[in-house]
Image (cartoon, helix red, strand yellow):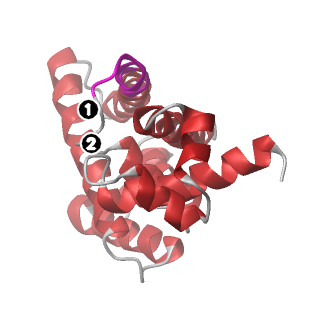
Amino acid sequence: MARPEREQQILEVAGRVFGARGFAATNVADIAREAGISKPLIYNYFGSKEGLFERCLGEASDLLIDEIERTAALGVVGLARALATLDGVFGVLAGRTWVWQVANDPTAPRTPGADALLGSYRERLEGLAHDGVGELLALAGDDDPLDLAALVAVWSSVFASLVDWWCAHPGVTPEEMSARCERLFAAVFGADAATTLSA
């Protein structure tokens, strides 16, 4: 197998292991065993456990941000944008919830590389949340910057909680989870809220 293909195979296995156990509780031997390769090969390709995690983190954060940017470009606004964002994330994570778990691993190493990746990911994620929430408030005629900051914090928490819940319930399909989010939003904001606010 050519090196690029072998690296990708290792990254996929490593991502699943890191996602399931967290960086701190994972060792290179676990990953090598799961991938059916030797520990020295992992060190040869990635240098260290931290280097391997950084590569997984880079792939995970790029995948998530690319998908959220894609849904942001669809042109829907308000709660409809929130639902479209969730639907897109559930779709891209189907069969690989490790992507979300690695990007949000509380035990991630405090290395310059990981810190830079996490900082960039969180900054871009917050920027997208700021844009979407800003549109929602503009529809309501609210231009108070502190309202915007508060609602960005609320939305970020709701978004993360829904994705976390879904990752913890592997029997729920992306389609089922998207439908659940629509029901929850309707229950909280009113049956026609998403349609009304996106008009």
In this view, the residue farthest toward the right is 2
Q: Which residues are magenta?
A: 110-119
Point 34% across, 33% down: residue = 133
In this rendering, position of residue 77 left or right of residue 146: right
Residue type highlighted by circle 1 = Val
Q: Which mark is residue 114?
A: none
Closest to the observer, 193 or 122: 122
- Kindly identify which residue carries mark 2: 155
- Kindly identify which residue carries mark 1: 152
In this rendering, position of residue 22 left or right of residue 51: left
Determine which quarter of the picture holds residue 142. top left
Q: Secondary structure at mark 2?
A: helix
Residue 180 is a magenta residue: no
Closest to the observer, 156 or 148: 156
- Rendered location of residue 188, percent (x, y): 21, 62
In this rendering, position of residue 61 left or right of residue 27: right
- Residue 31 visible in the displayed image: yes
Point 27% across, 26% down: residue = 110
Residue type highlighted by circle 2 = Trp
- Rendered location of residue 150, percent (x, y): 16, 29
- Rendered location of residue 157, percent (x, y): 22, 45
